[in-house]
Amino acid sequence: QVQLVESGGGLVQAGGSLRLSCAASGRTFSSNGMAWFRQAPGKEREYVAFITSSGHNTNYAVSVKGRFTISRDNAKNTLYLQMNSLKPEDTAVYSCAAAADGRYVSWGQGTQVTVSS
């Protein structure tokens, strides 16, 4: 199974931008669909975005569509999430996940994103 480590979180003012990275180890990264999720304090984990193994197709939650962009570099075994026009309600721990056989099989530990108003 692929192992995942997120980075790039931090504190940013509303309207600002951050780019998250998810470094994957293992030889299956390029064959895995990948996703970003987030979880705010006291709330359920929320789906953010998905990208197919080739990177040709993406999908976004309504709450982030038009502001966030998911991408991947299979040569670098890395998944990205570019977040623009950040809002305080985007504050959460963001985690990446690898999909296989119709389910998410590997998760990272998460990186904190805090957006101040």
Image (tube, rainbow, N blue to C red):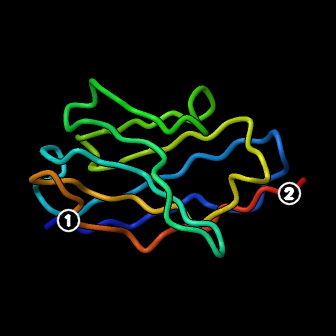
**What is the number of the mark on residue 25?**
none
Residue 110 locus on image (x, y percent): 48, 69
Vertical arrangement, residue 77 with respect to residue 111, above or below: above
| In the image, farthest residue toward the right | 117
- Which residue is depicted at the point 26% across and 50% down? 77
The image quarter in which residue 43 lies? bottom right
Give the image quarter of residue 5.
bottom left
Count of marks overlaid on the render: 2
Relative to 72, is 104 on the left or the right?
left
Q: Residue at x 43, y 74 (%)?
A: 109
Is label 1 in a helix, a strand or a loop? strand
Percent across and percent down for residue 95 are 45, 62
SS for callout 2: strand
Residue 61 lies, with reference to residue 88, above or below; the image says: above
* Of the pair 45 and 107, the residue shown nearer to us: 45
Q: Is residue 12 left or right of residue 107?
A: right
The percent coordinates of residue 63 (x first, y second) are 61, 39
Q: In the visual, does 63 lie left or right of 88?
A: left
Q: Which residue is mark 1?
A: 105
| In-front residue for pair 59/106 | 59
Instruction: State yes or no: discs 2 and 1 in contact (Cβ < 8 Å).
Output: no
Q: In the image, what residue occupies the spot 70% across and 59% down?
A: 91
Taking depth in this image into account, of 25 and 81 the one nearest to the observer is 81
What's the residue type where badge 1 is placed? Answer: Val
Label 2: how many Cα within 10 Å (few below 14, some 14–19, many 20+) = some
Sequence-first disc among 2 and 1: 1
Residue type marked 2: Ser
Q: Residue at x 73, y 62 (%)?
A: 114
Residue 15 vertical position relative to residue 66 in the rendered view, above or below: below
Q: Which mark is residue 116?
A: 2
User: Residue 11's quadrant in the figure?
Assistant: bottom right
Q: For the residues marked 2 and 1, what is the alpha-carbon distance in whole angstroms?
A: 33 Å
